[in-house]
Amino acid sequence: MISKMPKGAVIVNAFWRGGDAGAEKLSAVLSLLGITAPVLKSTDLSLYVSEGVQGEIPFDFAVYLDKDDHFARLLEARGVRLFNSAESIRLADDKMLTHIALAPYVRQPKTISSPLFFAGEEDPAFLDRVEQELSYPIVVKKCFGAFGKQVYLAKDRNSLVSLRSQLIKEPHIYQQFIPCDSSDIRVITIGGKAVAAMKRKAASPDEFRANAELGGTGEAIALTPALRTVAESASRALGLEYAGVDLLWDEKGYLVTEVNSNAHYKLIEEVTGVPVASLYANYILSELTKGENA
């Protein structure tokens, strides 16, 4: 028998206003397993640094659906077991850190990091080098963003210069465009194992981003050995216990473009029939009760 069922929480961003039922559903599924884990905003808790990290925490673990790795580290410093860890969230949330961490393990589109801007004048030679390495169109992404809303396409030098002037004070990257008929692939991994896959299609032929939040649609696809291997390698390399791995493809195979630490699962559940929330909740329970005799 399990001696004592742990108490938990599902943590969402302080500015979260709803619109996705994923947090509430995960809380409900955990409840069916006998685990109390209400949805809380990070501002529902008071944590601070003084003599060590201080603050009362009314739970033992948290499913962390935020991307605020500072607050995640405060929770870990107070002994809270996080799904995912603060470090894995940091690596996944910063797109350039993601690419660097994945470099030894999976194929990725050629990616160039913008130099960090402090002050001074722009060096046009940098864009010359970007053009030499990457042919148009060129994908330009903020390092921190979600739902495809901070991803742009430069079709020529004028648009590249315009995007750079907009983004120069923010961390961002320049990336090889991989033509995949306005589609990509999303694979969900839990505990480092691929459990579901779908092909996403952009809302129109003129839109290169296939995110569901931008009107993209999904269809179930098979988890082939090749697809499984790449997605699992990516999630494990980042230390993510739950991940959404986004991939494109070319004649050589799959390329990882992004890895999401708090990927929404509503669409992939609908199109594949895979109960992602239930699988994740059962994984969490198994991790929390390791060593207990059922």
Image (cartoon, rainbow, N blue to C red):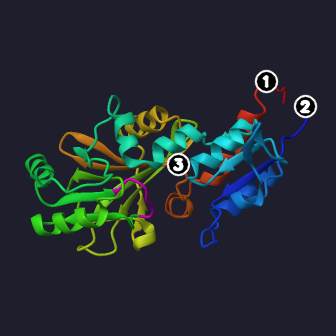
Most frequent secondary structure within the magenta stretch: loop
Residue at point 47% right, 38% down?
235
Q: What element carries label 2?
A: loop
Q: Which of 267 and 74 is in front in this view?
A: 74
Can you identify the residue that label 2 sits on? 1
Q: What element carries label 3?
A: loop
User: Which residues make up the magenta segment?
Assistant: 142-147
Mark 3–mark 1 distance (CA, rounded to whole Å): 27 Å
Q: Quadrant of residue 142?
A: bottom left
Going by the picture, which residue comes out furthest to the front?
120
Can you identify the residue that label 3 sits on? 261
Is 206 above or below relative to 81? below
User: Given contact means CB atoms under 8 Å apart, are the residues at marks 3 and 2 in contact?
Assistant: no
The percent coordinates of residue 60 (x first, y second) are 80, 41
Residue at point 78% right, 32% down?
289
In the rendered structure, find residue 291 and report the number of the disc placed on it. 1
Mark 2–mark 1 distance (CA, rounded to whole Å): 11 Å
The percent coordinates of residue 14 (x first, y second) are 65, 63
N-term-proximal mark, 3 vs 1: 3
The percent coordinates of residue 278 (x first, y second) are 67, 51
The percent coordinates of residue 166 (x first, y second) are 28, 67
